[in-house]
Amino acid sequence: MLRAESSPVLRAQDLDWNLLNPAFQRDPYQHYRWERDHGAVHVLSAGDHTYYRIIGYDEIVTVLTDTQTFSSRTTNELGWLVFRDPPEHDKLRQAIAKAFTPRAIAVLDAPVAEIVTDLWNHVLADHGGDLHEFCNLLPVSVISLILGIPVSRRQDMSRWSLQSLEVLGSMFGFPVSSEAKQGSAELVDYLKGLLDSYRHRPADNIGAHLVTLSMQGEISEKDLLAFAQFLFVAGHETTMHSLLGGFGILAQDQALFSRIKEQPELIKVFVEEVLRYRTTIQAIARISTRDTEIGGVKIPKGAVVIPVLANGNLDSKKFEGPETFVLGRPNANQHLTFGKGIHTCIGAPLARREMQLTFEHAIKTIKSITLDPLRPPIPHIGGSTNEYGFDSLSVKIEPMPTLDLIFPRAT
């Protein structure tokens, strides 16, 4: 769905293995098929560098869970949680987790549902259109909600978040614009001012709770600011592309849409299969701390190891018929999209709930959704170059005839 599932597996020499080529970000799946057919681990040379691409599901889990052999400290330029190793990582995550309790996530249901309704009303009023704006503003609005950022700033937050992602890519050798550097700095400045304000006035949100933890000495001010920035960069574009992927699947398969509309209890398993089938963050990086071996391939100390999450999610040894979207796949929730081990995404419960609430409301309020034949989907290019998704997804929607739309739109 929205990719060539049945295209032939080519020879290695027929594929462009310059993975910095935008064509690879647009459609990496022919490369993935070749890799899966030729082993669980592949050695790729690019210039003076050698990378060990881990593409088998079990081998990826081994890398992600063996933190003594595979370090997450791939950059020292960011103090983000994902770039920390134990014991430093564990102490920081345990402190942050006190603000991300199940109760804290559960009480967000009503306000998140309200955000979904507000933004979706305008998709309905337009009978569709490009869903990129909706899927972009929704996670930005939710993250703004939990940090206490006014809804009037969500366009700024969206722009700064996406620019920060571009800056992240530059730390791994990708080009970055001066506008992106400025936007990333503006995001940090804004968040610093917001968090500092909570030191002088109480507030009932996760951001203020994190500040309280900082004032109690459980999180340093530096780590607090780094996590707030990470929350935007990690939680915004990933959820946006997952939402777009889900809508693209529904718009392409009317039988699937009808089945979910008749059985809305299937939305949870639909979300899990979307996360597996259209993995947003394609790969992550680790550094080997000692000589080791994975999948019969020797990996020297200090090597760059790339667990390709998107390919692990297509491993036929784990998922039967992996390139087919299967609603109700019994093990879909065992996907690698949120990682495994100590670095499992701390915001995964919130991201899942955002998606569930979105598709529940969308399916309840529309009779049909189809791709706009005059405006074909535009694959995502840019960001950190490691994301898979859409820069544009135009659809035609027929609203339910009894809808009572609520206006005006929040800005």
Image (cartoon, rainbow, N blue to C red):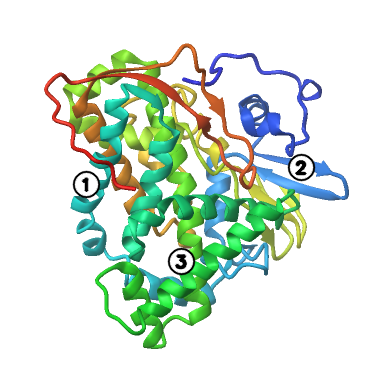
Q: Residue at x 23, y 56 (%)?
A: 108
Numbered tag placed on residue 228 in the rendering: 3
Task: From the viewer's side, name the closer residue of 393 and 347.
Answer: 393
Q: Check the image and name the residue furthest to the bottom.
A: 216
Q: CA distance from mark 2 to mark 1?
A: 48 Å
Residue for badge 1: 114
Q: Check the image and name the residue furthest to the right.
A: 48
Q: CA distance from mark 2 to mark 3?
A: 36 Å
In contact (CB < 8 Å): disc 2 and disc 1: no
Residue 33 place in picture, x, y as percent: 62, 26
Numbered tag placed on residue 43 in the rendering: 2
Residue 264 location, quadrant: top left
Task: From the viewer's side, name the closer residue of 173 and 149.
Answer: 149
Q: Residue at x 23, y 19 (%)?
A: 259
Left-right relation of 172 to 352: right
Crowd around label 1: few <14 · some 14–19 · many ≥20 (10 Å):
few
Residue 378 place in picture, x, y as percent: 56, 26
Q: Is residue 285 above or below residue 207?
A: above
- The amino acid type, in three-letter code, at marker 2 is Val
Q: CA distance from mark 3 to mark 1?
A: 23 Å
Q: Check the image and name the residue furthest to the front.
A: 408
Task: From the viewer's side, name the closer residue of 376 and 149.
Answer: 149
Upstream in sequence: badge 3 or badge 1:
1
- The amino acid type, in three-letter code, at marker 1 is Glu
Task: From the viewer's side, name the closer residue of 95 and 322.
Answer: 95
Upstream in sequence: badge 2 or badge 1:
2
- Badge 3 marks a residue whose secondary structure is helix
